[in-house]
């Protein structure tokens, strides 16, 4: 019962006018930042950070947290409308979300993304309240060997992200892994594959890569039929909200996405991006009609969008219970707490209950505000599709440039974006999809570092990967997955070729 | 010839005028890290104070990349008018000793140090239930074992240097397991995956208070304000080749009176109680040095580090 008492106490704090205003400002800024492609929550939060020096820590954290989970809501909007992810966590939403929009179903896609985010965000918060201390202990059980096994499992999911040829998907994943090797190697400290370019010393940036592969290449692709009438877009924008059938198909994916996101969000370095990929792969595997994926299956939007929001809730667990930031955003929040003399960690909940419970309660309210804010916006967003390409595309490019530049104020990132824009265009023309590359690019460094750390710790013995259940199990599952997807898909491919010839 | 003289005179005259009224417009403070880390926060707190001290807007611009040398190079190539300054760590201010790891297009000669401001503090840390209660225990155990593994930020960092220095003095074979940051080092120690590590103090502060981790020693020369009971590596008898620092740097041709103004402002800021509390809360040591003293420290660190890397075979 004390939990209910604590939560009421938290609401008491979150309902104070200043905190309510901070929460609203946070989620409002977060929505904007999420919608604009490339402009992520980190930039907005660090700009507003000095403001929080002067206000009470609870108010500051409520606002900064609002920007974070708010951006997770908004990130899917451009993925669905124009096939350009607003955030790295929304890359997979492009796959089916944009296809839905092409079929005149942008409204339901945006709607299910908003509802899924709301449900997952709220359920994630409940998990955060009940399980914070237990799960924090679970997170540290994962050592380098366990992380390696988990990342390996994640990588084996690439086969589910491909629409066409599995071989082409694996090729892209291989390229993604190679690209992730560029830059300073954590183990030796030496720079690899930078070819004397300073801009490559810390590796290729994720945002310029994603903006190029998705944003710039999308614009290039569409230039081909610039003067064609966009008939698809102008057809039925009849429904703005998901219908009964949509809900029926999305309920289970939202539930599973929430669970996946919640658990992966706890692991430092895991987080929302990976969970969205895992959720997509899971839905495709479990679906009764996997052939619809990549062609506008609503499950492919509902699952990943739920997963990344659940992960943004559970990402607070290692921060609040161990003081370990799971990602850059959590590091920012950690700093904001510490500058006020608070100690995020095992003692925070007892020493500063107002911060923990106030923030948690504000997040419940923030999620409601986001739903109220986002649902009416759907009508407005859908109108964007009616803007002619010749006006829309320069704007999209402009935002991609601003986004890629704002990450580290470096013009080199703009060249990176352009190079990947052209590469992405060529890849897509030849039927190579960018999503497997992005997944491999994100997993690559963690895969490599954890493998090498595990081997240094075991003094070169490979036995660590098979003798422990937490390493052996994921590796075994990934082996089964790989075999079960590659073999039948090769067979199916052959069958398809034959039927096409008929 | 005449034109050259005129040009030089006019530059000298110009800078003279500018220095007297400096600063008359917005100052940009380059931070060579991504936003969010403790260094970035320290820089923002400093910029906030500098703004009030100089009565002029100070904008923080994050220029991460190049292992901090992109930010450093921005300063090395900036106009030397005092309006582009850098909040730089060791790796960005003396890039020439790190050439084994990364080659930067500039050296410390292209920069002018203004003042030392802060010092990030690394802590030799073990799990609370670890059998080691002091650095001596760790060393004794290490002497008996074949190797002692340690989680560090990598071979170019202070944590590696400290444990290798201890190891050489005591004949312990410390093997480093490099991690990509504190958020990975801390769980590795907490989960018992590595017996000892050198995370930054801010990352473990709350876990030490909650008795989940123990600090054996801090990688400092003098005891930290925020942890007066924890011994330093130096007082336990090991000579530190360098101590990490964060300082204000300007392009090399910046007029001396502008540098002096900045150094004086930094002195006032670092002696302000409110600023010190803020930084101590984050587990960062405030260590002011004026231009001359800072320049001396840098040149001795440069020599010592070059010697250490040579011994370790980490030279190009």
Image (cartoon, rainbow, N blue to C red):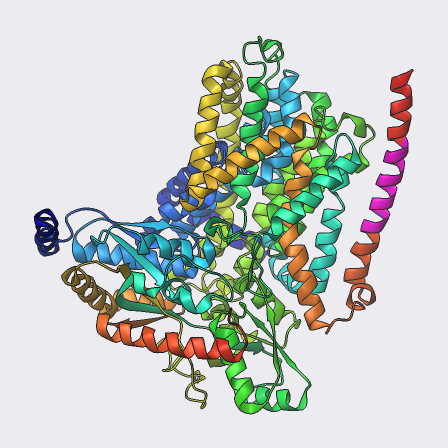
Q: Quadrant of residue A3?
A: bottom right
Q: Position of residue B41 (x, y in %)?
A: 38, 58
The correct choice, above or below, for A210 with respect to B39 in the image is above
The correct choice, above or below, for A299 with respect to B214 in the image is above
Highlighted range, magenta: A478-491
Q: Quadrant of residue A206?
A: top right
User: Which residue: 58% across, 29% down?
Assistant: A79
* Magenta part, dominant SS: helix
Horizontal side of residue B190 vs A298, given as left or right: left
Horizontal side of residue B46 vs B259, given as left or right: right
Considering the image in quadrants, where does the C terminus of chain A appear? top right
User: Which residue: 68% across, 33% down?
Assistant: A433
**Nearer to the camera, A276 or B143:** B143
Horizontal side of residue B215 vs A423, given as left or right: left
**Nearer to the camera, B174 or A341:** B174
Q: Position of residue A98 (x, y in %)?
A: 63, 25
The correct choice, above or below, for B122 with respect to A154 in the image is below
Is residue A91 visible in this depiction of the protein? yes
Verify whether residue A194 appears in magenta: no
The correct choice, above or below, for A499 with respect to B55 in the image is above
Considering the image in quadrants, where does the N terminus of chain A appear? bottom right
Q: Position of residue A96 (x, y in %)?
A: 67, 28
User: Which residue: 43% across, 52% down?
Assistant: B64
């Amino acid at each position: 019962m004390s939990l209910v008492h604590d939560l009421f106490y938290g609401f008491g704090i979150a309902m104070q006018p200043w905190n309510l205003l901070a929460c609203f400002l946070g989620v409002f800024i977060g929505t904007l930042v999420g919608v604009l492609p490339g402009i992520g929550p980190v930039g907005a939060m660090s700009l507003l950070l000095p403001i929080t020096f002067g206000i009470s820590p609870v108010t500051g954290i409520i606002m900064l947290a609002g920007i974070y989970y708010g951006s997770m809501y908004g990130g899917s909007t451009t993925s669905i409308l124009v096939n350009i992810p607003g955030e790295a966590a929304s890359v997979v939403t492009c796959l089916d979300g944009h296809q839905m929009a092409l079929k005149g179903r942008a409204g339901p896609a945006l709607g299910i993304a908003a509802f899924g985010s709301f449900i997952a965000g709220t359920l994630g918060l409940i998990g955060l309240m009940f399980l914070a201390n237990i799960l924090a202990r679970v997170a540290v059980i994962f050592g380098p060997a366990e992380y390696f096994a988990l990342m390996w499992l994640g990588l084996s999911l690439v086969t589910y992200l491909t629409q066409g040829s599995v071989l082409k998907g694996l090729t892209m994943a291989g390229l993604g892994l190679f690209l992730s090797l560029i830059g300073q190697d954590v183990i030796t400290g030496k720079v690899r594959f930078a070819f004397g370019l300073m801009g490559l010393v810390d590796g290729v940036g994720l945002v310029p890569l994603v903006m190029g592969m998705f944003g710039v290449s999308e614009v290039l692709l569409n230039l081909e039929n610039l003067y064609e009438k966009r008939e698809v877009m102008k057809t039925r924008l009849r429904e703005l909200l998901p219908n009964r059938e949509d809900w029926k198909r999305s309920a289970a994916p939202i539930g599973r996405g929430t669970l996946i996101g919640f658990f992966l969000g706890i692991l430092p370095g895991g987080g929302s991006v990976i969970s969205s990929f895992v959720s997509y792969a899971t839905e495709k595997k479990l679906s009764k009609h996997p052939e619809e994926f990549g062609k506008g299956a609503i499950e492919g939007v509902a699952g990943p969008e739920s997963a990344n929001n659940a992960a943004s809730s559970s990402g607070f667990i290692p921060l609040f219970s161990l003081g370990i930031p799971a990602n850059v955003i959590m590091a920012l929040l950690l700093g904001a707490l510490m500058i006020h003399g608070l100690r995020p960690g095992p003692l925070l909940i007892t020493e500063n209950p107002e911060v923990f419970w106030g923030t948690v309660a504000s997040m419940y309210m923030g999620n409601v505000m986001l739903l109220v804010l986002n649902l009416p916006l759907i009508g407005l967003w859908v109108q964007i599709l009616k803007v002619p390409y010749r006006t829309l595309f320069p704007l999209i490019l402009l935002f991609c440039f601003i986004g890629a530049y704002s990450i580290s104020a470096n013009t080199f990132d703009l060249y990176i974006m352009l190079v990947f824009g052209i590469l992405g265009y060529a890849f897509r023309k030849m039927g190579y999809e960018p999503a497997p590359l992005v997944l491999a690019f994100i997993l690559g460094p963690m895969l490599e570092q954890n493998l090498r750390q595990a081997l240094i710790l075991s003094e070169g013995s490979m036995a660590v990967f098979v003798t422990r259940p937490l390493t052996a199990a994921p590796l075994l599952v990934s082996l089964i997955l790989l075999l079960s997807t590659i073999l039948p898909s090769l067979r199916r491919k052959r069958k398809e070729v034959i039927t096409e010839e008929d | 010839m005449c034109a050259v003289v005129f040009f030089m005179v006019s530059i000298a005259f110009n800078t003279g005028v500018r220095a007297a009224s400096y600063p008359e417009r917005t100052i940009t403070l380059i931070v060579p890290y991504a936003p969010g880390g403790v260094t970035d926060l320290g820089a923002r707190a400093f910029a906030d104070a500098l703004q009030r001290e100089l009565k002029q807007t100070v904008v923080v611009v994050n220029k991460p990349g190049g292992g901090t040398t992109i930010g450093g190079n921005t300063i090395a190539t900036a106009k030397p008018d005092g309006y582009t300054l850098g909040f730089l760590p060791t790796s960005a201010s003396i890039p020439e000793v790190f050439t084994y790891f990364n080659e930067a297009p500039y050296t410390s000669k292209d920069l002018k140090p203004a003042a030392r401001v802060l010092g990030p503090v690394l802590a030799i840390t073990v799990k609370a239930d670890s059998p080691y209660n002091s650095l001596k225990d760790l060393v004794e155990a290490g002497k008996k074992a074949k190797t002692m593994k340690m989680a560090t930020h990598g071979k170019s960092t202070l944590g590696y240097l400290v444990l290798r220095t201890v190891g050489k003095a005591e004949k312990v074979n410390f093997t480093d397991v490099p991690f990509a940051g504190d958020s990975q080092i801390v769980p590795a120690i907490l989960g018992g995956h590595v017996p000892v590590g050198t995370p930054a103090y801010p990352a473990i502060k709350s876990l030490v208070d909650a008795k989940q981790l123990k600090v054996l020693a801090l990688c400092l020369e003098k005891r930290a304000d925020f942890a007066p009971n924890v011994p330093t590596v130096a007082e336990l008898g090991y000579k530190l080749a360098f101590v990490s620092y964060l300082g204000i740097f300007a392009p090399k041709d910046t007029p001396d009176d502008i540098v002096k103004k900045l150094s004086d402002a930094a002195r006032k800021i670092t002696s302000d109680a409110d600023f010190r509390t803020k930084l101590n809360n984050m587990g960062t040591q405030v260590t002011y040095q004026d231009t001359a003293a800072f320049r001396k420290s840098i040149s001795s660190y440069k020599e010592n580090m070059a010697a250490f890397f040579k011994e370790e075979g980490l030279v190009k």
